[in-house]
Image (cartoon, rainbow, N blue to C red):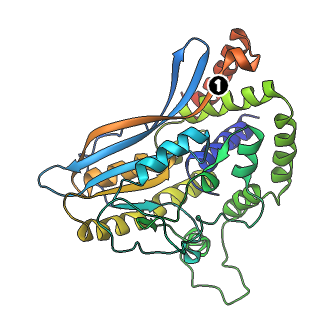
Amino acid sequence: MRKSACIFLGVLALALAGCHTRSLTAEAPTPHPYTRVANPDTQTVQLQIALRKFVPSRRGGPTIWLASVMHVGEKDYYNALQRFLDTQTVVLYEGINPEAHRHHVHEATGPSTPVPHGAAAPSDANSGYSMQSTLARSLGLVFQLEAIDYDRTNFLNSDLSISQIERIMGGNRPAAAPGQKVGGNATFDTLLQIMDGSSFLGSLFKIGMQIIASSPQMQAVAKLTMIEAIGRLKGDMSDVQGLPPDWKQLIKVLIQARNQNLMADLKTELKKIPRSGSIAVFYGAGHMDDLEKRVMGDLHYRPADETWLTAISVDMRKSGLSPAEAQFLRNLIQGQVDQMRGL
């Protein structure tokens, strides 16, 4: 039971804050969290996500923003993100299967403009069903890929493809012949099946979402569970003690291998834009712990400022949850998180 709960929380965190599915200097400090649980009053619980600004430590140069994101959230959250991203010189965004999308930004040195014949939003691992989109609708929220306008002159897709990830998971074996699949990783296949709804667990998830959507109180319970779980699962998910070794390895690849690819694009774009410009790395919050270490250790940048945006909120007065019920749920989630971290 404990193992199943740990896997569920791990998949939830990975799906909502990690993915749409090296060499570091020793002195890089442990990053501050990019997620937090906030209580603006006694009846409101919020999940807040950080946008963190970095500047060069020893010279002038472009600003880097690590713009972490939750993949499902409230409409106002994505409106605020859109306004922020549109002010950046370049936005490096997450989206597996980047071959299907524009790779290079137009020559631009200022805020973005709409693209006349722009690319679509980054693709999910499936076509049609989306775990995150289904979850968002069931909770009265919106899905990032449906809320953010990616048809912008300053947007650059910076991610690996499914086939690249499969090769990495398979030990970088040679590419398979057309119509054949790379000998890969059963855990990665399981994750894709959960995300696209084709597995037994994926089917159960869809049924569960239909039930939750039918009850405002159950919606509130589900959102509070997400807030408490995502807000408390901080740092590198691959280091969580309660996850099985195969899931820890999968998370390590999905985060660190993609971050390594992203850093190559970041270094390239830093050389192209003016010193007064800015680059936003628009990725799931689960990537940011590792990315911050890379930005500080490899690029010699330091944190200078941060902004917190509210992604999801629950109003206990409107939800029908009593204070005792809410506290019981918080304690339950905290217990599971402590178990996962070996506390």
Residue placed under numbered mark 1 in the picture: 314
Q: Amino acid at mark 1?
A: Val
Quarter of the view holding residue 333? top right
Q: Residues within 10 Å of mark 1 (few under 14, many from 20)?
A: many
Dividing the picture into quadrants, the one containing residue 146 is bottom right
Please tell me which residue lies in front, 264 or 257. 264
Reply above or below: 116 against 333.
Answer: below
Name the residue at 64% across, 29% down.
336
Given residues 72 and 120, the one toward you in this image is 120
Kindly identify the residue that appears in the image at 74 percent across and 86 percent down.
179
**Residue 240 placement (x, y as % from top left):** 54, 41
- Tell me if 339 is positioned left or right of 273 in this view: right
Given residues 290 and 157, the one toward you in this image is 157
Q: Residue furthest bottom?
A: 177
Q: Give the x, y percent position of residue 91.
A: 41, 60
Task: Give x and y (percent) for residue 25.
Answer: 25, 53
